[in-house]
Amino acid sequence: MFSEKVQNARVGYTFDDFLLTPNGSYVEPKNVDTTVKINDDISLNIPILSAAMDTVTESQLAIALAQEGGIGVIHRNKTLEQEVEEVKKVKNADDITISDVITINPDSSVSEVQKVMDDMSISGLPVVEGEDIIGIISRRDVKPIIKSGQDKLVKDIMTSDVVTIDESTSAEEALDIAYENKVERLPVLSDNKLVGIVTIRDILNHKKHANAARDKDGRLLVAAATGPFDLERAIALDKAGADIISIDCAHAHNMDVVKFIKTIKENISGDLCVGNIATSEAAEDIIAQEADCLKVGIGPGSMCTTRIVAGVGVPQMTAISDVADVARENCIPVIADGGIRYSGDIAKAIGAGADLVMLGNALAGTYESPGEIVVMNGKKYKTYRGMGSMGAMTGGFGGGADRYFQEIQGPMKHTKLIPEGVEGAVPYKGSVSEVVFQMVGGLRASMGYCGAKDIDSMKEVARFTRITQSGIKESHPHDLLITNESPNYPTLE
């Protein structure tokens, strides 16, 4: 019986075990469509999420990734209130309408106006009397008289002929109105009451990110992580505007977790993503609890030691394909989480049935990721750690510990924890946009080789060739000393 268990064990495969086989193709990389539809209301323009890790995703990186067409998952190793604020920062980041408008009354002096502008770092103020907007004043009005006319009143120098727009005015319409009337800012009215203000700068910034992933109201998309039993956090994040709530635990096929999925689902309005899992049985049980999305990966991450410490896991390509077989029957998106080192791995994951990939290491060293840049031996690095590392478990607010079903007890925190991750540093990679450009560019190239016009086509037409260790060696640059590193081929071992 035991010998059969060992001898009949199936073989598991990961990314390096395969190459995609080139097909006859009329598809050029520049023409492929990388959009992914998660549900009727949520679509991404690139199939990339950022990992819910405390050295990867906070609001700054989530904003940058959403502007590129993906979505960031805010980590939960912080207080509920702090995570809610991070979500709100993303949802408000690219809104062209500033709703919290600072105003001034017509009887204020020039010196008062100057102080407000300096203190709040703004260049213009609507002038209101009661609930009515009667003018607008800018630095341009104040600057010529700042020294000689400190005591002059706002009503004497303001622009009285105010050009306003309605709440329903689109960004394009607002820009046309601003240019036509040669104004820099437009007060927004609802029932003749001031509810916001729009500036040309914000409109142009909005238009600059034409590929951004936005909700139906034009705001950037964002996801947020919650514990497997943290209903209060899930509800708060949902109310804050998170488009996807992601249950974040190392083993989502724990049956207590499975049973609680429906409770969370019934109390939120956004989509519910559940992970991590690695088997078809897990997919079946979780889908039965009405999850909207599945996250696959037990131990493939570069900083994860679960497969060594616990001896548990499924090589990532096998795990993706097993889960995808079940998910496809139920029209549930699959996220491949972990093990992505190169852009070609994204293509392989999609070819094996994934709809999206989650990146941790690849985004950890970017300018927008949390943490400071450090210099070691003349090279720039940023810190990166697994959420099962000792630092993540004992630092922050426990998001690392309960993810692995552990508790911090007593003053000697580290003696009562079994870490399943390590801490380290990764090379500084520049901006998120630069990393995404290379990753998506490699995916586009792969889709061109395979003859796939879009992500769904890639899942269908992709064919694999299983390779040997010699094939892996042949696939990488060999028999030379690399003197000029490529941005899409990291050489750090």
Image (cartoon, helix red, strand yellow):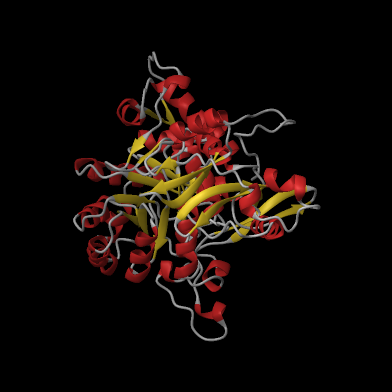
- 460 w.r.t. 105: above or below: above
Please say whether residue 366 is visible from this viewpoint.
no
Q: How many marks?
A: 0
Residue at 30% x, 49% y: name it. Answer: 293
Viewer-proximal residue, 36 or 41?
A: 41
Please say whether residue 359 is visible from this viewpoint.
yes
- 172 w.r.t. 221: above or below: above
Q: Position of residue 210 (x, y in %)?
A: 48, 32
Of the 4 image quadrants, the one containing the N terminus is bottom left
Q: Quadrant of residue 217?
A: top left
Q: Residue furthest front?
A: 156
Q: Is residue 384 left or right of residue 300?
A: right
Viewer-proximal residue, 163 or 419?
A: 163
Q: Position of residue 307 (x, y in %)?
A: 45, 58
Q: Position of residue 16 (x, y in %)?
A: 48, 38
Q: Is residue 151 left or right of residue 106?
A: right
Of the 4 image quadrants, the one containing the C terminus is top right
Q: Position of residue 94 (x, y in %)?
A: 50, 45
